[in-house]
Image (cartoon, coloured by chain):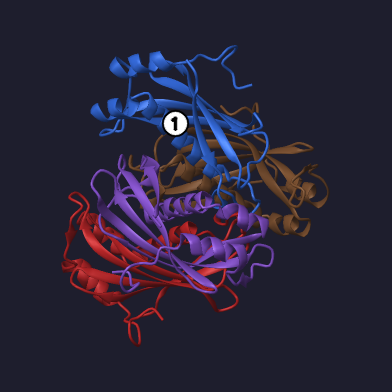
Chain colours: A purple, B brown, C blue, D red
Amino acid sequence: MMSFESTFKIRSFHTDSFGHVNNARYLELLEEARWQFAEHHGLIELLNEEQLGFIIMQMNLRFRFPIVEGDTIQVFTSLVTLGTAVGEVEQLIKKQGTGKLAAKSMFTFVLIDRHSGASVPIEGKIRELLLHIIQPKKGSGEIP
Amino acid sequence: MMSFESTFKIRSFHTDSFGHVNNARYLELLEEARWQFAEHHGLIELLNEEQLGFIIMQMNLRFRFPIVEGDTIQVFTSLVTLGTAVGEVEQLIKKQGTGKLAAKSMFTFVLIDRHSGASVPIEGKIRELLLHIIQPKKGSGEIP
Amino acid sequence: MMSFESTFKIRSFHTDSFGHVNNARYLELLEEARWQFAEHHGLIELLNEEQLGFIIMQMNLRFRFPIVEGDTIQVFTSLVTLGTAVGEVEQLIKKQGTGKLAAKSMFTFVLIDRHSGASVPIEGKIRELLLHIIQPKKGSGEIP
Amino acid sequence: MMSFESTFKIRSFHTDSFGHVNNARYLELLEEARWQFAEHHGLIELLNEEQLGFIIMQMNLRFRFPIVEGDTIQVFTSLVTLGTAVGEVEQLIKKQGTGKLAAKSMFTFVLIDRHSGASVPIEGKIRELLLHIIQPKKGSGEIP
């Protein structure tokens, strides 16, 4: 299973007075990429049917070089682990046309009931779907 | 009745690659100033009690000169008109230490029921409170 | 000349606790649509060549009904007036699949030198290009 | 040396359609708290004098429970490690009035020359100042 690719063109409003994409903006672009990934795999309909949602419990991001206005970035999103209650999504950011890794990130999520807000096990149709799209990382599972 | 003053220090993340505070950031700072205004006047408790909320139907902003990182801005918020269903809040932005007007804005709001989303008349305790804090503009009521 | 169409899928992070797209988010989506419009017409290269940029001096937005998570919006961007120093861009927001106008907006811009920050006349190649893509509004030019 | 405390009132525009403060908003609130911390310690003037700036190379955040509209949060910011080129800032988020830890985070930063964008050693007056305000973590230095 391949990772899912999203592309974004970086605009003036994504950057701060350093001329770099700001941390908070990265998180919005990565969240948009996770939504596109979920949509592509038919996950959003399933979540809406069952009134469930994913929320992020932990995140780790490493930046290698800054992205600036005018750059186009590719975000590669993959589901890399799936436990009974918790899963992990890896997202890599590359600068288009260079193949260079600008940032890597790992997001740990849980499933919640949208009404109660309580965490629920990842099971049934949603688990089935996730097992189809999971792409375990080679090696240790550690963020290198 | 005096207008209510909020102050904000402008950070790198408020500005874009031009080095100016971005339009969307202005709206967040102005919204925060309106929340502080509402809180100061005891309006938030009343809205929560009755499960009502204000939403913006129209806005008009004029920018005179750009605000940059390191500037401190003062936002002066006043309720300037109040109809049966609609009111107007004026917000002026000055650069601290200069007295200079950097931007002026007018927001037209309606009251909605937070459950149904439907617009409701501005009446009862909320109207009473707003009539206490209204400060009609001198002159035409037009944004000059 | 037709207006330029951009589409956006509304995500959870675009909305606030009312469940509506927040004002500041509208401005980001509209700014992104203006960048796409400028890119489509070859304007960004020209601006970069001459180290110029457009900045917004005034904006007026009217909201007719709220947009919520899961909606897809179409933004229609047109250049509607062009003076020697100032121009106006109109942007209409429709909810896809309904044809209904959710919001309309007008942005007044000037051209600045990116180094000095000073406003400069809209002339030369940039004026030529804008005269090709201008689409004057029928009627009064007023926001109805 | 005590950690520095910032407080923020959570507004509707900080939350998403789940009613929770969104990830990207947390990063903006944490960045604002780091600016207040730097300002409080006289660091911003020093950085401006030498045309230097801190940028984030890595961040790790863990969320324990969601923060919602109307909550007030306290952010406790401390410098916990300082190497020759890299340092770490820890930020804890507590819900006011409960003492409960809502989130914890660690940010790894480097110092850059604002003109060249190149990373520079943390030395001279800036190092001196940071050595005054550092507050090493008890125990392993690991995020538990």
Residue A71 x %, y %? 30, 42
Q: Is residue A90 above or below residue B127?
A: below
Looking at the image, which residue sits at the far bottom?
A: D139
Identify residue for label 1.
C34
- Identify the residue at image location x=81%, y=52%: B125
Q: Is residue C119 above or below residue C137?
A: below
| Quarter-of-image position of residue B47 | bottom right
Left or right, B68 with respect to C25, comes to: left
User: Toward the viewer: A20 or A125?
Assistant: A125
Residue A1 x %, y %? 41, 57
Q: Quadrant of the C terminus of chain A?
A: bottom left
Left or right, B43 with respect to D113, comes to: right
Left or right, C94 with respect to C8, comes to: right
Residue A87 x %, y %? 48, 69
User: Toward the viewer: D45 or A44?
Assistant: A44
- Is residue B121 among what the camera can see? yes
The kind of secondary structure element at disc 1 is helix
| Quarter-of-image position of residue A142 | bottom left
Residue C40 x %, y %? 39, 27
Q: Is residue B87 above or below residue D76?
A: above
Tag 1: residue type? Arg
- Identify the residue at image location x=24%, y=61%: D46
Could you classify mark 1 by the number of other residues whose Cα lies within 10 Å: few (under 14), some (14-19), or many (20 or more)? Answer: many
Left or right, A4 with respect to B124, comes to: left
Looking at the image, which residue sits at the far right?
A: B124
- Is residue B70 among what the camera can see? no
